[in-house]
Amino acid sequence: MPSSLKTVQGKEYVSAICKQSSEEAFLSADGFQGDGIADTKHHGGPDRAVCIYPFEHYAYWEKEFACTLPSSTFGENLTVSGMLEEDVCIGDIFQVGDAVIQVTQGRVPCSTINMRTGLPDLMKKLIDTGFTGYLCRTLKEGIVCSDSMITLLERDPHAVSILYANEIYFRGTRDLEAMNKITAVDALAAEWQKKLAARMEKLQTV
């Protein structure tokens, strides 16, 4: 749930980024039951019901910043192994516990990550590396347990990886061909569809 937190400088802010581990939780179309959202403008909603972050990146960031990071540092609902941004594609469908989820977009980091960790360069480096994690919609509601396996049910035929989409979304703002490729994926989150379509229209009218 959202709570009042403090930065390392003592400044207060409200966020739900600090997640508590749970043995099991019900995943609905709107997200995990009991998972609070402080900033509903930029977080949550059907296309962003589940936030996933690869476990492998923790070691990378701990080495990069010479620190120890707490669990769910990035506010993710699920910390997973073997599902890096370069391997997971928009539209991929996974079974997790009794639920079924579909990848919709890369996660867009916000400054709350910097405030929580006290690492002012972390958000920028998440974007620079593309190690942002990613978001999913719920196709089938159900119980997810802490030891639930995640199984790939269907690979999206467009094969647009999260890492590729991140590169274009954050830096390839004039790559019309790449944006066409990404927006051709039916499963792409509506917000990304809208933003990329606006960029494409602007390029085509210049």
Image (cartoon, helix red, strand yellow):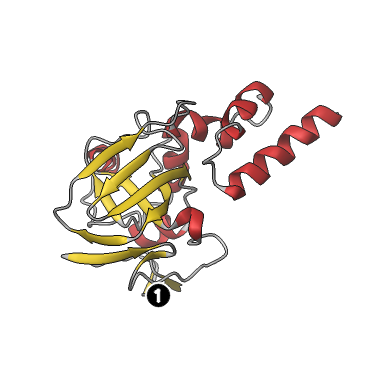
Task: Where is residue 142? Give x, y as percent.
Answer: 29, 61
Tell me if residue 19 can be seen: no
Q: Residue furthest bottom?
A: 4
Q: Camera-side residue: 63 or 206?
A: 206
> Which amino acid, by three-letter code, is at mark 1?
Pro
Above-or-below relation of 86 to 11: above
Residue 89: percent from left, percent from top: 42, 33
Judged left or right of residue 58, residue 12 is: right
Q: Check disc 1 and report the residue beneath it.
A: 2
At a point 78% along the width and 30% down the height, the residue shown is 203
Indicate left or right for 66 with 166 as reference: left
The quadrant of the image that shows the C terminus is top right
Q: Is residue 90 above or below residue 95?
A: above
- Residue sitting at x 42%, y 41%: 126
Tell me if 33 is positioned left or right of 47 in this view.
left
Residue sitting at x 48%, y 62%: 44
Confirm whether residue 129 shows in the render: yes
Classify 177 as above or below 95. above
Total marks placed: 1
Residue furthest to the right: 205
Classify residue 66 by image quadrant. top left
Q: Residue 138 placed where, x, y %?
A: 40, 55
* Percent x, y of residue 6: 38, 72
Left or right? Give the position of 122 relative to 193. left
